[in-house]
Amino acid sequence: MMRETNVGYLARSLAGHDKGKVYMIIREDDKHVYLADGKLHTIAKPKKKNPRHLQLIKKYEKPELTEKLLKEEATDLQIIQEVKNVES
């Protein structure tokens, strides 16, 4: 089954001053993705980034969290926990 969206995936930044940092994709539009780490870049104030500058980390997909993100019910704490699992 193909996914229509990358929302809910974790991604590592490949370019820019944040190179190497892990984020969660919380929204997408035609040209950009919006990323949150739950701390500096929260759900309310996400980082806008070109998707070509990201490496998706698909093995960390969590369907229940993706559902919450799409319904705008996720919290920064949930994102912090998922990002921490990858960074450690």
Image: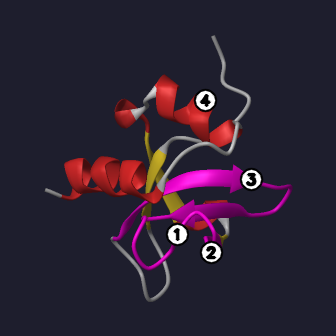
Where does label 2 land, which residue? 45
Q: Earlier in the sequence, mark 2 or mark 4?
A: 2
Q: What stretch of residues is rendered in magenta?
A: 21-48
Q: What residue appears at the point 44 percent right and 79 percent down from the top-left corner?
A: 40
Q: Residues within 10 Å of mark 2 (few under 14, many from 20)?
A: few
Where does label 3 land, which residue? 28
- Name, please, the residue furthest toward the bottom: 17
Residue type at tag 4: Glu
Please tell me whether residue 39 belongs to the stretch shown in magenta: yes
Q: Determine whether 87 is above or below 73 in the image.
A: below
Indicate the secondary structure of the residue bearing disc 2.
loop
Q: Earlier in the sequence, mark 4 or mark 1?
A: 1
Q: Earlier in the sequence, mark 3 or mark 1?
A: 3
Q: Residues within 10 Å of mark 1 (few under 14, many from 20)?
A: some
> Which quadrant, please, contains the C terminus?
bottom left
Residue type at tag 1: Thr
Indicate the secondary structure of the residue bearing disc 3.
strand
Q: Residues within 10 Å of mark 3 (few under 14, many from 20)?
A: some
Where does label 4 land, which residue? 67
Where does label 1 land, which residue? 42
Q: What residue appears at the point 61 percent right and 52 percent down from the top-left corner?
A: 26
Evaluate if marks 2 and 1 touch, with contact meaning CB atoms under 8 Å apart: yes
Evaluate if marks 3 and 2 touch, with contact meaning CB atoms under 8 Å apart: no
Residue 5 is situated, as x and y percent measured from the top left of the image, at: 70, 36
Q: Determine whether 60 is above or below 21 in the image.
A: above
Per the model, the C-alpha gap separating discs 3 and 1 is: 15 Å
Indicate the secondary structure of the residue bearing disc 1.
loop
Residue 6 in sight: no
Residue 29 is situated, as x and y percent measured from the top left of the image, at: 82, 55
